[in-house]
Image (cartoon, rainbow, N blue to C red):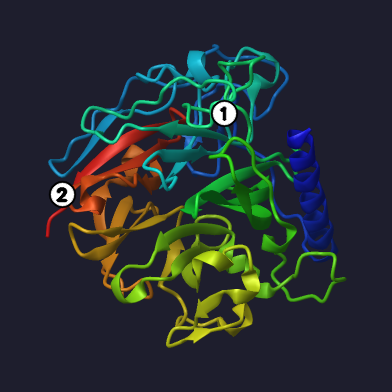
Amino acid sequence: MRRRLVRAATTAATCAALTATALVAPFTGTATAAPCGSTSNGSSGVPLPSFGSLGSSNPEGPPEGPQGPLPYFNNGTTKAIAWVTGPRSENRTLTRFGISGTDIGAAWDNGSGQTLMAFGDTFGNCSAPGNQWRHNVLLRTDDNDLADGLTVADGIPGVVTSGASVSAAAPNMARQMIDAIGWSGVEVTTIPTSGISIDGKQYMNYMSVRAWGSAGRWDTNFSAIAVSSDNGQTWSTPLDTLRVNAGVTVPLPPDLPEVKANNAKFQQSAYVAGHGADSGWIYQFGTPNGRFGSAYLARFRPDDILDLSSYEYWTGSTWANSIDAIPDTNAPKVFGAPVTELSVAWSEYLGKYIMLHSPPTGLQMRTADRPEGPWSLPRNLVRPTYGIYAPMMLPHSPALLGTGPELYYNGSLWADYNVVLMRTTLRR
């Protein structure tokens, strides 16, 4: 009964948001990407070998999908450690969780020392009807020694600290977290972009993708915050947290989500808790849909995460109480385009904030003393030829805790359509 109520609430929120979007936002994209299917350019912008189509009911490829051997990469500073997901990973996620391919792996500490990892579009048996596609899944790990890889324990039905949320009927199939309509041009999928734990609850920001466009471009209906009180077993989306993406400000009836032009600047997000002078605030870095926008910044008190009216926004020189105060100039940008999926964390080792993202020039790192900057020039960690995107820092990295220089993060590889554990050794 509880899962039906949660799904009903989430569906109602989605329908309201899509109604608001439909009133003001045109459809401009085309659906393309397909890790189990035919060759296409997906949202990563990297051509994909032939393996099936997104959510296709016509199985064509091998059951295990496109994953190959772990790519060798070691430039002396940054190294590929091990697969986190896929049939070739030590976690054997195809047979244990029904995951042959997935990406993102946004990671955060659940408040009790366990790491939660939220993944995007997920495929299982590529020979099965529908490819066992889920819009998103969650894995959990208690492994904090990442030098030899990241281990995920078995999923156990009803156990909220086990490796995944699974059912008694399908104990080897990680369950979907956030539903989506599944129609291109309406809502093709819902993809997590970041998460944070506050007072024992889990909060996950995600985007509702209307359609995939050309390489590195996609349209979104809205971004929103999903909430879980049971460590990610079940999720619900409060309607008031939706940022409808229409590109204009439109007055709508009070039962529909507020439509603000600047909502477009926060369709993808990264959370980081403030440190030192910034303590007591949670900072939210936002970017538009796609991989060609700039980075923007908001902040809020932890108790106000679900109350968007309590957020403050960086204007380039001060904090303002309204998202409308962000001008369309260079001033409010944390830094300029192109900014892709990103993660931000405080590094005790460096005594600075760290930001990772992967523009066309390769996987990059920037640092800053304050969330609003100024941010350093980028330091290139991995060349673009390796195709690594969506670098998501792992919260128990020594470089973040201050116990060493090693920074661990999940990186996605489009050709293999799986997540790899990466390590960068930082220098002071």
Neighbour tally class for label 2: few under 14, some 14-19, many 20 plus, Cα within 10 Å = many
Residue 118 % position (x, y): 51, 40
Is residue 34 or residue 275 the one in the foreground? 275
Numbered disc 2: secondary structure: loop
How far across and how far down the image is residue 105, in percent?
45, 39
Closer to us: 160 or 185: 160
The residue positioned 72% from the left and 74% from the top of the image is: 248
* Picture layout, residue 391 above or below residue 318: above
Q: Which residue is mark 1?
A: 165
* Residue furthest out toward the bottom: 317
The residue that disc 2 covers is: 405
From the image, which quarter does the N terminus lie in?
top right
At label 2, which amino acid type do we have?
A: Pro
Q: Residues within 10 Å of mark 1 (few under 14, many from 20)?
A: many
Q: Quadrant of residue 166?
A: top right
Can residue 298 be seen here? The reply is yes
Q: Which of disc 1 and disc 2 is earlier in sequence?
A: 1
